[in-house]
Image (spheres, rainbow, N blue to C red):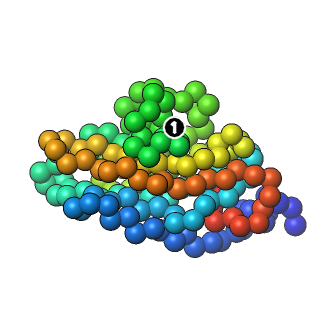
Amino acid sequence: MNTETILGSLAVTIFLLPGVLSDGWSVQHPAGPIYAVPGSAVIIPCLYGYPDPGQRYRVRSVMWCRNQAYCVTPRYVYHSEGIFPELAYQGRVEYLGDEANNCTLKINDLRVSDSGMYVFRFITDHPVEKLPGQAGVLLLVTGKTAGFLKSI
């Protein structure tokens, strides 16, 4: 059985970290690191919430960044408005989420240099309240197959 067959048939449950951050603002993603091999693809499951969704406030933009707790960076892994894309991720990233509560991200053709802490952030039209900084989810791209959580 080759590695692709093993990885392709790997069925693992992803545990989401309860991420209630402050007054109804939340982000939930895997609690532990996600392991993947170079050349594969990974899906980072993610859900988010905020006060009064769809009633008084709307999501204006969503973004993923790497190694930035507040996702205030000159370069983004993904940004819904397409601003400041990190060149290393162009053509390899798919946002599988929406602007309601799903923030799932897929990264294709993984490289060892993709390893790092991935942080999701969203901005609403709320005049004052904002999502606080967060820890994110650790992605480790390595040639070793032990410890995989989700890799396709």
Residue 24 shown left or right of residue 108 in the figure: left
Q: Residues within 10 Å of mark 1 (few under 14, many from 20)?
A: many
Residue in the image at 58% along x and 73% along y:
13
At label 1, the amino acid type is: Val
Pinpoint residue 52: horizontal percent, then vertical percent.
16, 58
Pinpoint residue 7: horizontal percent, then vertical percent.
74, 62
Residue 108 falls in image quadrant = top right
Q: Judge by depth and name the residue closer to the eye, 20 or 104.
A: 20
Pinpoint residue 5: horizontal percent, then vertical percent.
79, 63
Residue in the image at 60% along x and 61% along y:
33
Looking at the image, residue 68 lies above or below residue 33: above
* Screen quadrant of the C terminus: bottom right
Looking at the image, residue 29 lies above or below residue 122: below
Looking at the image, residue 75 lies above or below residue 18: above
| Residue at disc 1, secondary structure | loop
Residue 78 shown left or right of residue 117 in the figure: left
Residue 151 visible in the displayed image = yes
Residue 94 visible in the displayed image = no
Residue 94 shown left or right of residue 79 in the figure: right
Q: Judge by depth and name the residue closer to the eye, 122 or 32.
A: 32
Pinpoint residue 45: horizontal percent, then vertical percent.
49, 59
Q: List the residue tagged with mark 1.
A: 77
* Screen quadrant of the N terminus: bottom right
Residue in the image at 42% along x and 29% along y:
82
Q: Judge by depth and name the residue closer to the eye, 42 or 24.
A: 24
Total numbered circles: 1
* Residue farthest toward the right in the current orientation of the protein: 1
* Residue farthest toward the left in the current orientation of the protein: 56
Residue in the image at 37% along x and 31% along y:
81
